[in-house]
Amino acid sequence: MAVFEQIDFAGHEQVLFCHDASVGLYGIIAIHSTALGPAAGGCRMYPYESSTEALKDVLRLSKGMSYKNAIAGLPLGGGKSVIIADPKSDNKGELLKAFSKHVQGLTGKYWTAIDVGVGPKDADILAENCDYIFARASQYPEGFNPSLFTALGGFTGIRATAKYLWNRDNLNGLKVAVQGLGATGSELCRQLFEEGAELYVSDINKEAIDYVVDNYRAIQVSVDQIHAADVDLFAPCALGGIINDETIVDIKAKAICGLANNQLVSEEHGIELKKRGITYIPDYVVNSGGMMGAGTRIFSKPTMEDSRNRVLGLYDTIIELLSLSDKEDRPTSEVADNMAEEILMKTT
Ligand code: NAD
């Protein structure tokens, strides 16, 4: 399908298809908006079944980045990139190096970083040929992963949600289901466990589950039932699309606050969650911690403390969003979109 007819094309400024036959690179960079500043958003490596599927993903994700960066108050626009490949490929390094030349060619109009399949050490490989890479392992103390900022944002979002809905100042005994125990989900579990939350978890990777079960006294739930767990709050931290026609009817949690991108399959699912009395914290609001922590390095030199403090500011943003949603009797997803669109419109 041609780009302009793609259902997910939303006035993107530029879409760049990147190919390098010598290493088998097939990648796409989507720049949704540079109204607020250079487009910024991670690079995902994933074995998409078709280029149409990859295009759909990058178009949706890049638009989400415009909204995320706007609500996060960052002087950054929205962009995202995908490389169609298995991140376990033997030639991952070659693919990253070939891809980064395309990012360099945009001379700073687009900055990229980590995402699913591309970690902080990979970001250092991207940076070998490119000046426009952030969230690199070498920018942080040994062992620190910038995804930890995202996880801190998730934890902050859950604290704000618990305060708003249940007037709780602590999470003691709060039942939380976490789907996906990777860089963000596992760290979120650690913080929740330390605050006394009861964890129910699932992942397709047994090692990831074993770690969280052994260290954070979590209870394993099957991959196809985690959304239906009888808990207070559901935190999707795997891939997108978990809130859909099939899953929504089974959700028992009273709130959804997780870090995965594009959790709602469509806007209608945001409306349906409200009808069902389920409070949804829009994904791009709560998962902006990574951009707040790491993306700020594009335009400033924050200390770790500055970065953490900025992420902790999500508490107030989420309380404000929930209050507005109640006051106006509108779904949180709609309220957040309007907040972001207003910020974007002011600059154009
Ligand atoms: P990750 O690749 O480190 O972890 C994802 C985990 O989900 C893996 O352990 C994987 O095995 C698991 N998983 C995949 N499919 C699953 C399924 N069907 N059921 C249960 N588990 C499944 O990724 P991450 O960095 O933790 O990111 C998770 C989500 O958060 C993604 O949607 C990503 O785009 C989003 N996000 C991440 C960041 C960040 O800083 N890392 C920032 C913003 C948004």
Image (cartoon, grey):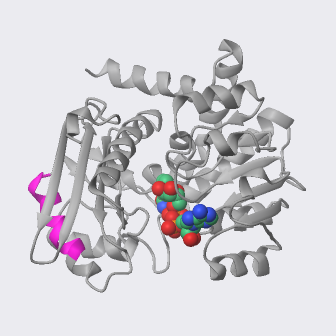
- Would residue 181 be found to the left or right of residue 35 on screen? right
Q: Is residue 274 left or right of residue 336?
A: right
Residue 96 drawn in magenta: yes
- Whether residue 320 is visible, yes or no, is no
Residue 89 or 323: which is nearer the viewer? 89
Q: Relative to 81, does residue 135 appear above or below in the rendering?
A: below
Instruction: State the residue at coordinates (50%, 49%).
Output: 261
Q: Residue at x 54, y 47 (%)?
A: 241
Figure quadrant of residue 95: bottom left
Q: Is residue 231 left or right of residue 262?
A: right
Q: Which of the image's four quarters has the N terminus?
A: top left
Q: Position of residue 179 (x, y in %)?
A: 66, 60
Q: Nearer the viewer, residue 61 or 3?
A: 3
Where are the magenta residues, as a range? 95-107
- Give above or below for 134 relative to 215: above
Q: Is residue 198 part of the magenta span, yes or no? A: no
Residue 106 place in picture, x, y as percent: 12, 51
Which quadrant of the figure has residue 214?
bottom right
Depth check: give the residue in front, 114 or 249: 249
Circle count: 0
Most extreme residue toward the top is 328
- Quadrant including the C terminus: top left
* One can see residue 29 in this view: yes
